[in-house]
Amino acid sequence: MTRLRVASILWAGMVLAGISSAAKEQAIKIPAFIKQVDAKCYYPQQHGLRDLSVKVIMPELESKMATQKIALKTTYYWKAPNQEKFAVSGFPKGQEANRAYVEQLLKSGGAAIISRPTAEALKTYQLTAVKQGNLVIIRGTLKQPGTGPQKMALWFRNYELIRMDADQGGAEVRMTQITTVKKGGQLLPASMRGELIAQGKSQPLSTKLSYTQVKGITLVSQIITKVGGQTVTMKFSGHKVNQGVPDSVFK
């Protein structure tokens, strides 16, 4: 499994896992609960973001490509409601397949740059939820086979996410330490720590996010994911906000 695929599991979603509690389980109304969760979270598209283009610097990947004489350059594009694309250049003629492969890897991580509201992200899942003491646990399974995690589970305390797990194609991610940062009175993810379990082996796993403000909108400025002793860094610079990204970019 590639490091970028591991990151995509983190960014794309969370998976079914058990939790023990002596507290009596109580059913809850999922749509109403998720509405309260989304009201507590910060989504830039709900604060005036219509489109975005931003340069992406990936030191580890670019260094690796440089040994193959590839001067990798990447730009991320997003346009409301949910169009997004990584445009990659620097590949010599004849390496179109390699460029397409890198673009697909990066696309899998795009969900962390402009996050979709929880209610929207969970539309493709069959959900159940229970309340155990002061925790609410939402579990789900994909309605149809897709590219995201096959199952998911999220643990909330006071409408704030405190744990999330993921399972995708034999690899499990368990994020048990989650911190947030408040922007404009709403929450954004700041860090996640846990483990990756694959082929019977466990490795420490963490993600840290940093933010910047552009035209009064809070946007991601850096994402660092560490898997064991390896690091995947994505730095974002030159944010261009609401300058009219054409639909043709996404074709």
Image (cartoon, rainbow, N blue to C red):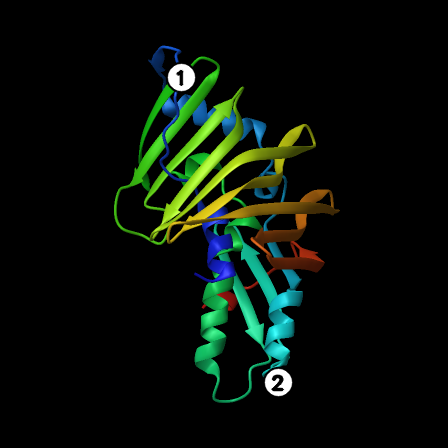
Q: Is residue 58 left or right of residue 202?
A: right
Position in image of residue 199 (x %, y %) = 37, 54
Position in image of residue 146 (x %, y %) = 31, 52
On the rendered image, what quadrant is the C terminus found in? bottom left
Residue at the spot 62% in from the left edge and 37% down from the top edge = 188
Residue at the spot 55% in from the left edge and 69% down from the top edge = 87
The residue closer to the viewer here, 49 or 3, is: 3
- Residue type, label 1: Ser
Q: Quadrant of residue 130?
A: top left
- Kindly identify which residue carries mark 2: 69
- Residue type, label 2: Lys
- Check the image and name the residue furthest to the front: 201
> Is residue 114 in view?
no
Q: Quadrant of residue 97?
A: bottom left
> Is residue 184 in view?
yes
Q: Quick check: 54 above or below 9?
A: below
Q: Is residue 24 left or right of residue 34?
A: left
- Check the image and name the residue furthest to the left: 144
The residue closer to the viewer here, 199 or 89, is: 199
Rendered image: mark on residue 21: 1
The residue closer to the viewer here, 249 or 40, is: 40
- Check the image and name the residue furthest to the top: 24
